Every structure is written in C-alpha cells, then in structure tokens.
Amino acid sequence: MSGLRALVTGSGGLIGSECVRLLCGQGWNVVGVDNDMRSQFFGPQGTTRPVVEDLLREFSGYRHHAVDIRDRQAIRDLFERERPRFVVHTAAQPSHDKAASIPYDDFDVNAVGTLNMLVAARDYCRDAPFCFTSTNKVYGDRPNDLPLEELDTRYDYADGRAGVDESMSIDACLHSLFGASKVAADVLAQEFGRYFSMPVGVFRGGCLTGPQHAGVELHGYLSYIIDCAVTGREYTIYGYKGKQVRDQIHSHDVVQLFLAFFRHPRCGEVFNLGGGRANSLSILETIDVLAGFGLQLRSRYRDEPRTGDHICYISDLSKVHEHFPDWSITYDLEKIFGEMIECRLRQRTGGSG
Ligand SMILES: NC(=O)c1ccc[n+]([C@@H]2O[C@H](COP(=O)([O-])OP(=O)(O)OC[C@H]3O[C@@H](n4cnc5c(N)ncnc54)[C@H](O)[C@@H]3O)[C@@H](O)[C@H]2O)c1
C-alpha cells in the first residue's frame, strides 16, 4: 500500500488515531482532519491534541489539518487537493447523553458534517472506499424490546440469540438526539452507496475501546471505568442493577475491518460491529474483572438508567464474518483490560502513554 493516500477524520480520536497508526505503519500517506472539538464537548480532559502531536512526531507520512468537518468549503477544498484513495470518517460528537444539551452542534457535526464528507467524496474521489462509523444507538431503545432474562450478574437474551443483527428496525423508538443525528448520517451514507453506487460501508459500533480513548464519563465506558479504578475516583452506576451488558471491541480490530473493507468494498452496506458475545460483559462483571487485576472500584448506585440506555446489547457479527471471512477479533477481554490498565498505570506514574 506504499504511497497511497488516505483521509481520516477524527484522526486524534480513538478510532481515527488507530487508523492513522495502522495505515502509516503500512506505508500509506495519511491526511488527518481533527479540530479537537472533543475538548469543547467534554472539557480539557477530553482533548485529543496530545494524540495528534504524537502522530506528527511518529509518522513522517502523516499530515494534519485542524479543519472543522462542518466547514463545507474547507472539506471540499481538501478533497479536491488530496483526492484520497481511501476515506475513514470517524469525526463526531460521540456522546448519547451530551447531545441533548448541544442539539445544534450535535446535528451539525454528526449529520451535516457527514453529508459534507459524502458530497466531497462523490465529487473528488468517487471510487475510494469510504468507511463511516455509525453506532448501535441508531437502533434506539428497540433492543430493550427483545426478550431478556435476568441472571446473577447480567441480563441476557431469553431466546438464545447471539446478539443484535442488522435486520433490527431503526424506526419508531427512542433514540436520544445523538441517535437521531447518527441515524441521519447512517441513512445518508447508505444512500450515497446505493444511489451513487459509491463504495460506502456503514459500521454500527457497539462499545469501541482502547488505550487511546480520552475517556470521560459521558463517552468511553471502559476507558472511564478503568480510569476510575486506577485513580480511586468514584464511579456511578446508572440503573439496571449494574447488570447492563455491552460488547467491547478493541480499536485495532475495528481498523483491521476497515482495511478489509478497503480491499473488498460494497456499496451502501451496513454492518453491526462490536466484540460479540465472547467480549461481552456487564458493569458488575467489569468490576469483577478489575478486581482480578488487583483494582478495587469505588462505586455508587443511582437507581435511574440513562435515558434510552440499552439493557443488553451484544453485536451479532455473522454478517461481518460472512462478508470478510479473513477478519476476526484478535483482542479478547483479558488482552483489552490488560493493555488499558497498563497504559493508565504508566500515565499515572509519569511514563508516556
Ligand atoms: N467509542 C465508541 O464506543 C463508539 C461506539 C459507537 C460508535 N462510535 C462512533 O465511532 C466514531 C469514532 O468514535 P471515537 O470513540 O473514536 O470518538 P472520539 O471522540 O475519540 O474521536 C472523534 C474525534 O473527532 C474530532 N471531531 C469532533 N468534531 C469534529 C469536527 N467538527 N471537525 C473535525 N473533527 C472533529 C474530535 O476532536 C475527536 O478527536 C464516532 O463517529 C462515534 O460516534 C464510537
């Protein structure tokens, strides 16, 4: 892949930065777009600027543009100049809970920003595979209608299903404004694939995680809970007795799938993407795993779930496996926790992260 040019938005973020590392490591030239808007969303703790500085230091093939994806003309100019062979669009307002307090910013970034990206790609690099990071929140709270059973430490599906597949309706349920802005972007991305026959892939993420996450309470569950365990900060569990289940996928595995899509793109195809059943765990089980690593989490319980929060969400990965048979999860929970805990401990003791 040496010498090919990719454009990655949100390049300072969890998924974007992993993408830059992987592509630059394989000899790609990468144009990154990130205006550190995460620090506006979540305050200084959410900044991704240090990650961008690391990327610039580490990779001569990386060039950075602090362009705002809402700036339609700037995005068009960038695409016209760079004409990338591969586009990965991860820039977003990523928090379910935050969106209600910033409805215009949320929609402008998530929906309009994605439209800006898609039109520019259509006009300047129509054949370049385009990966869009959507979310399982497009299903709103519909997964809560599935038959569930309560077990000792978690909820699970009562009908024995592996997880949620792509046939679930995204309509007529409670989404949060974030879910709604992502639905708009998700459907737009599908439409550019179908209507303009562009190689656009829509990846509906579950819990995407990794040590690069600038975890804050409102986004980045695993990163934030590990941070609390390492620093001794109190963690608040919101509702469902702490038995709510998420499946965790490491950013490395996410980006490997994007590369698989680059090699075998499809037009407007939707994929659920998470760690799957083997990588699923509840908050109570997360606390147990942390204890296994010698970390005691201080927690308090508020008997009030977050609005629209999923009780049990596990991605059914059948379609991903069917379309990309060479791809598989390489990070199990043990490896994910081990790496993230080690990274946080190193940061605390002053080592580089
Ligand atoms: N992390 C998860 O658990 C998860 C789950 C499902 C879906 N997703 C989706 O995956 C994508 C990536 O998530 P992430 O966890 O890497 O997010 P992140 O917040 O770590 O990274 C997003 C980056 O985009 C940048 N950004 C935001 N607005 C911008 C703008 N207007 N212009 C330019 N840059 C901007 C931010 O500064 C940040 O660095 C998002 O679309 C998110 O909705 C994430």
Image (cartoon, rainbow, N blue to C red):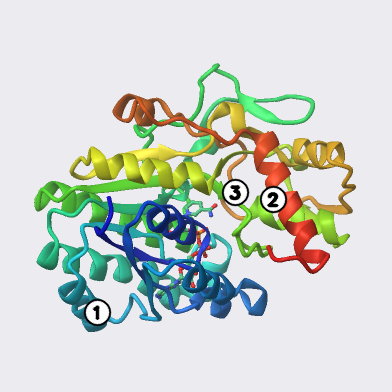
Mark 2 lies on a secondary structure that is helix
Mark 3 lies on a secondary structure that is loop
In the rendering, at what x and y percent does residue 295 appear?
87, 47
Q: Is residue 171 visible?
A: no
Q: Is residue 117 visible?
A: yes
Vertical placement of residue 79 versus 118, above or below: below
Closer to the camera, 266 or 140? 266
Question: Measuring 34% from the left and 44% from the top, which residue is drawn there?
Answer: 259
> Where is mark 1, residue-wise?
72
Q: Quadrant of residue 243?
A: top right
In the rendering, at what x and y percent does residue 53 appear?
53, 75
> Where is mark 3, residue-wise?
309
Name the kind of residue labelled 2 in the image: Met
Question: Measuring 57% from the left and 68% from the top, which residue is drawn there?
Answer: 98
How many residues crowd around disc 1 within 10 Å: few (fewer than 14), some, or many (20 or more)? some
Q: Quadrant of residue 337?
A: top right
Question: Measuring 19% from the left and 80% from the top, which residue is drawn there?
Answer: 77
